[in-house]
Image (cartoon, helix red, strand yellow):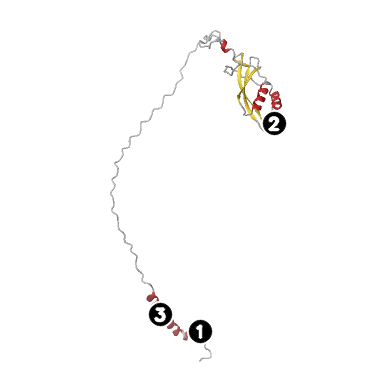
Amino acid sequence: MDAFDTANDRLKRSFGSWFWGSMMAAVVVHFAVMAFWPTLRAADVSFTMEDMEAIELPPELEIPPPPEQIQRPANPVVSEAMIDDDVTIAPTTFEDNLPDDLPPPPTESQAGVGDQPTFTPFTVAPEVRNRNEIGRVLQREYPSTLRDAGIGGTVVMHFFIDEQGVVQNTLVAESSGHTALDQAAERVAQAFEFSPALNRDQRVPVWIQIPITFQTR
């Protein structure tokens, strides 16, 4: 053996044994794979075509022609009017032109209008004059047992007001559900002061409706 023998020289000399050994191992592996590999079968990918059905096309639709364009209306023209400066309009009063369908005057059976609520025409509604006083009366007449229990309610009252704005009659139109509150509302209603209702320039007696509410603060 040469004293200067290197590893590269030894690898070159053993190349033949490594090469043929690798070839024999590869042949054995391929033979084993081909011998023991399962048999493969091709899948059936055939298909059948269904019969095609012919479809009859609908007849062509006749499209109607577009409607004729509507003519624009003619532009209005202001005509010249000749007005005589000497023409005057006579003054018109209700006394000279009384209507023919006035209602008949009230009969004796209608004189008691203050007994039950009824409609009386008016052009100016009555207004409450003493709102601050009503607030104090409302607190004073509130039943203490209901106020301490936190129970409140609203009573709708009918008022009959004469030509001077004085309350002549009161009726409970809608109860609060508590008799004590209804009675207190009737006492509060007597303290109201109103301005008189007017029908044009005449004072008239009227029935009105006002809710009175009791509530704890």
Q: Which of pointers 3 and 2 lies earlier in the amino acid sequence?
A: 3
Q: Residue at x 37, y 76 (%)?
A: 35
**In front of the other: 41 or 163:** 163
To which quarter of the image does residue 56 belong? top left
To which quarter of the image does residue 171 belong? top right
Q: Nearer the viewer, mark 3 or mark 2?
A: 2
Please name the residue that numbered disc 3 is placed on.
28
Q: Position of residue 113 (x, y in %)?
A: 59, 15
User: Tag 2: residue type?
Assistant: Thr
Near mark 3 (Cα within 10 A), the count class, few <14, some 14-19 or many ≥20, is few
Q: Position of residue 76 (x, y in %)?
A: 44, 22
Q: Residue at x 70, y 24 (%)?
A: 137
Near mark 1 (Cα within 10 A), the count class, few <14, some 14-19 or many ≥20, is few
Badge 3 element: helix
How far apart, in angstroms, are the residues tagged by discs 3 and 1? 30 Å
Q: Which of pointers 3 and 1 lies earlier in the amino acid sequence?
A: 1
- Side of 164 where 58 appears, left or right: left
Please name the residue that numbered disc 2 is placed on.
145
Q: Quadrant of the C terminus?
A: top right
In this rendering, is residue 140 above or below 39? above
Please name the residue that numbered disc 1 is placed on.
8
Q: Are marks 3 and 2 in contact (CB under 8 Å)?
A: no
